[in-house]
Image: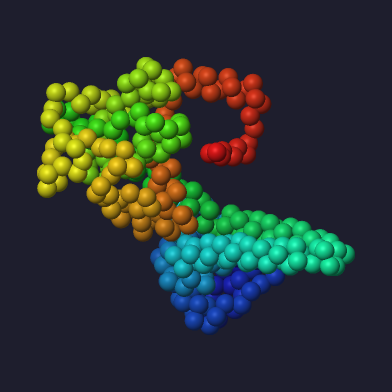
């Protein structure tokens, strides 16, 4: 907690948790001091309330980055500067890139020396293992920095809010007021490939439906993984519009883009790929999404799958029983082979 004296116009120090202090630039001190002197509610409030006001009002990145972690704010409305988030992720990626470079070059050198100078090659191998350990440690430290820099509450809350927005949009799209009048996009699930491949295909269908503002109708009769169809394993994609009915359908992309109902081919046969296929992300989400996530498309496809893969109660029970039998524990890593 800061003392009032540290924010006066002539104040020079900000106290940290271990009672050491760091100097602020003159311009930052003056700006913070002026804001504090003009705090509208007087000086009867707690230091945390005063600092909350200063953080919101000041444009100084230096002040924000120093104050937030020190006072332990949990205010999810206070977001980090774009430059800070970008730089934090860039440093993490550069650490990985540096390790890839060092690892590949040193491994090659070790291989060249193994026959001529085996002892030296062995020492190089030991040095490489030590360097890898330091690389993991440094990446962990950078991850921890993101948890204690004062912005973790905002990142988590922003991710939750944006996910909720996307899920509501998908639900609205898939549940039109009138199914008869809705624009429909029919997608067949029976692509001749494995389960993972079919789910990729379904995600592609959902993305195109979102991009063209069509309600996705899933044709899963005689599905290779369950003859009863998708809806017996997972929740239906819509509560009121799951059948194409007797409407006339035109093969994608239709004529002049004006067709009400479209039949979507497998992505392998798509002659006119739309601009919103991977790795595209909805344009209106980019400013918010790119601020808290370094790989926006991964988050976006995750939201599509979150909507699609909602198990039926019987399926969820089978999953829970299998997890219990396998003694499933976290962390869990999935790999497509």
Q: Is residue 92 above or below residue 6?
A: above
Residue found at the far bottom of this picture: 26
Q: Is residue 261 above or below residue 70?
A: above
Q: Quadrant of residue 18?
A: bottom right
* Relative side of 26 to 99, left or right: left
Q: Residue at x 74, y 58 (%)?
A: 133
Residue 298, percent across and down? 45, 49
Residue situated in front as seen by the camera: 265 or 245? 265
Q: How many marks?
A: 0
Q: Is residue 259 visible?
A: yes
Q: Is residue 19 visible?
A: no
Q: Quadrant of residue 245?
A: top left
* Relative side of 125 to 57, left or right: right
Residue situated in front as seen by the camera: 120 or 214? 120
Q: Is residue 33 above or below residue 127?
A: below
Residue 239, percent across and down? 28, 25
* Relative side of 57 to 66, left or right: left
Q: Residue at x 41, y 20 (%)?
A: 226
Residue found at the far right of this picture: 119
Q: Quadrant of the N terminus?
A: bottom right
Q: Is residue 132 above or below residue 327?
A: below
Residue 42, percent across and down? 45, 65
Residue situated in front as seen by the camera: 330 or 107? 107
Q: Residue at x 46, y 32 (%)?
A: 194
Q: Residue at x 79, y 61 (%)?
A: 125
Q: Quadrant of the C terminus?
A: top right
Residue 103, percent across and down? 68, 63
């Amino acid at each position: 907690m800061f003392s009032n004296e540290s924010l006066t116009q002539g104040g020079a120090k900000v106290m940290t948790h271990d009672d050491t202090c760091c100097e602020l630039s003159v311009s930052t001190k003056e700006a913070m001091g002026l804001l504090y002197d003009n705090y509208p509610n007087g000086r009867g409030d707690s230091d945390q309330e005063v600092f909350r006001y200063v953080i919101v009002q000041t444009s100084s990145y230096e002040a924000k980055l120093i104050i937030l972690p020190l006072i332990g704010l949990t205010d999810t409305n206070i977001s980090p500067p774009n430059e800070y988030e970008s730089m934090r992720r860039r440093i993490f990626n550069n650490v990985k890139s540096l390790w890839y470079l060092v690892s590949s070059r040193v491994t090659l050198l070790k291989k060249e020396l193994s026959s001529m100078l085996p002892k030296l090659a062995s020492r190089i191998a030991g040095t490489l293992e030590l360097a890898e350990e330091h690389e993991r440690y440094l990446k962990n430290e950078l991850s921890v920095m993101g948890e204690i820099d004062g912005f973790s509450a905002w990142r988590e809350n922003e991710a939750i809010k944006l996910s909720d927005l996307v899920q509501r949009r998908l639900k609205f799209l898939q549940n039109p007021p009138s199914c008869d009048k809705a624009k429909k996009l029919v997608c067949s699930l029976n692509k001749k490939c494995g389960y993972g491949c079919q789910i990729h295909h379904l995600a592609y269908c959902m993305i195109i439906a979102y991009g063209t503002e069509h309600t996705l109708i899933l044709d899963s009769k005689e599905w290779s993984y369950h003859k009863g169809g998708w809806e017996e394993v997972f929740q239906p994609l819509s509560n009121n519009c799951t059948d194409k009915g007797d409407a006339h359908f035109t093969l994608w992309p239709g004529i002049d883009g004006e067709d009400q109902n479209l039949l979507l081919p497998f992505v392998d046969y798509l002659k006119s790929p739309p601009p919103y296929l991977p790795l595209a992300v909805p344009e209106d989400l980019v400013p918010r999404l790119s601020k808290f996530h370094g790989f926006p498309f991964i988050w976006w496809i995750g939201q599509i799958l979150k909507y699609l893969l909602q198990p039926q109660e019987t399926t969820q029970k089978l999953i829970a029983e299998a997890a219990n039998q396998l003694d499933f524990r976290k962390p869990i890593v999935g790999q497509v082979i």
